Image (cartoon, rainbow, N blue to C red):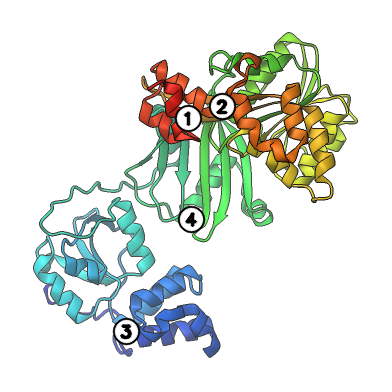
Amino acid sequence: MTANTLEPSPATDASGAGLNAATLLDAIIEKAGLQPHQVAPLLGVDRHNPSILKIERAVTAQRVLSNRELLEIKTRLSGFLPVDDDMFPTTEVGSDNARKAAALTLTGTDGRAQLAMVDPDSRRIAALVPVIRKDPAEIDVRVATLEQMTSWISAINHYRAYDPDVPIEVAQGRPLPDVWVLIDELVNSGGSDLHLLPNEPPVIRVDGDLRRLQYEPATVTWLTQAFQDLAGRDLTEELEGHTNLNIALRFGTRRVRLVIARSDAGPTLVARLLSERIPAPEQIHLPVAVRDWADLHAGLVLVTGVTGSGKSTTLAALLARMAERHRRKIITLEDPIEFHLPGSRSVIDQRQLHTDFADFPTAIATVLRQDPDVILVGEMRDAETIHAAVEAADTGHLVLSTLHTADAASSISRIIDFFPSEQQPSVRSKLAYILRGIVSQTLMKRSSGGRIAAYEVLQNTTAIRNLLENPEQMKQIGSFMASARQDGMSTMDQSLAELVKARQVEREVAAAKATNLDQFISYLGD
């Protein structure tokens, strides 16, 4: 194509009807085999005034066609070639006209330049020529899909409106390396998590903050190969049978937990770097009352908090202390196994979901016939698991587990609410009897670097037990905990205030985690 004329390439079939909203919609209907009555729900209110961008958003959102199929249609109708595979975005076109045209300049490793456009009609092209930051003679126009354009903009980490008067420094996306190199970067940065998603560059979390790595976006093909490399096997069949997979693996002396899930855009992965060794309870600043739970013999202990708040580390620290001090048979049911517990004086039997057992309720029933003293249930995610765990604690075993709840009171309510209303009174009474304690935790930035946890602690004293048995008095639990420091209890706001006063955490950071800002401020003594 003669680049400075910005005309369709003679290498394509330009004999079609041209690319516009009507021709694009007709081609999509034919390709997807849609019936007339399916067009209205596809476009919604946009059917009254369709445009190429509106149509593409609907087709992409509802997965009517693949991105490749859509690109083939647009190439045929427009007469423009698609963007070459080895091109990557380097800079924005730089004007309001460019934003309206949904266009972006790209370059290849050999220096050639291309102008990608979602809707390359003559008016938009003419508007772009004066503002392109390259000689028009060096650029050729290519057609692109909206999904491609979105991924390219994401790759350069730029979502603000185009402004030709504001120079923008754009990081060039490097080709994606082997997935193990990304794990290297996670380790070397002191990060905790690596996030891999389709059409996005890799992202790592360091001290709680997300950082976008300067690589090109991941493709589904690359992700599929990365999953296979990490797991050491083809995961296609396993992914078809489950909505997500949890896998633990070794990476040198470190352990990594993989969570692979499915999304509308394709498979996703979060790789969490696990601690090299199990910390002592004192090292993670567990309250003394919680440390003493390692000496319990029966009942239910819960560790709660959002994902990534350190629940697994807390449980591992307690179990390691227990194994060190006592002669017990400890059986863990995990998804996946994150820490390998030392045997010490106890007998340790660790089992992993989908590898050693099929589901938590059945596994708990099996474990109860194997003479355990202590049972760890990795997570109580459904009514059946909660019922089995409560029954195990009620038969004289010590059961430890987790919930994704923010505080002690909501943890108790969550358990009770899993049961039918007619069963709730008996469950409430049983829980009041078997519960030993709840620790709810959150992680935040430490002032000196790294992260530190704040803990809310509930001890099931006689007074708490009385409150548990009366649903009308449940709401008093928080205020009672705040006044029961002598029993080892504390609220989250009290814990946060103590960290601020000890200069471990900045006031603003702690305030963002407070459950009641006024109470938090009062505990600071301002």
Query: Circle 2 sits in a helix, a strand or a loop, which is it?
Result: loop
Query: Circle 1 sits in a helix, a strand or a loop, which is it?
Result: helix
Q: Quadrant of the N terminus?
A: bottom left
- Residue 168 visible somewhere in the drawing: yes
Tell me which amino acid carries mark 3: Asn
- Residue on which disc 4 sits: 221
- Residue on which disc 3 sits: 20
- Answer few, some or many: residues within 10 Å of disc 1's Cα (few below 14, many 20 plus, some between 14 and 19): few
- Residue 1 visible somewhere in the drawing: no
Tell me which amino acid carries mark 2: Thr
**Mark 2 or mark 1, earlier in chain:** 2
Q: Are the residues tagged 2 and 1 within 8 Å (C-beta)?
A: yes
- Residue on which disc 2 sits: 491
- For the residues carrying marks 4 and 3, which lies nearer the camera in this image? 3
- Residue on which disc 1 sits: 519
Indicate which disc residue 199 carries: none
- For the residues carrying marks 2 and 3, which lies nearer the camera in this image? 2
Tell me which amino acid carries mark 1: Gln
**Mark 3 or mark 1, earlier in chain:** 3
**Mark 2 or mark 3, earlier in chain:** 3
Query: Circle 3 sits in a helix, a strand or a loop, which is it?
Result: loop
- Answer few, some or many: residues within 10 Å of disc 3's Cα (few below 14, many 20 plus, some between 14 and 19): some
CA gap between label 2 and label 1 equals 10 Å
- Estimate the x, y position of residue 440 in percent, counting from the top left: 60, 30
From this view, report whether residue 101 is shown above or below residue 515: below
- For the residues carrying marks 4 and 1, which lies nearer the camera in this image? 1
Task: Give me the residue at 35% from left, 50% from top.
Answer: 216
- Estimate the x, y position of residue 330 in percent, counting from the top left: 78, 22
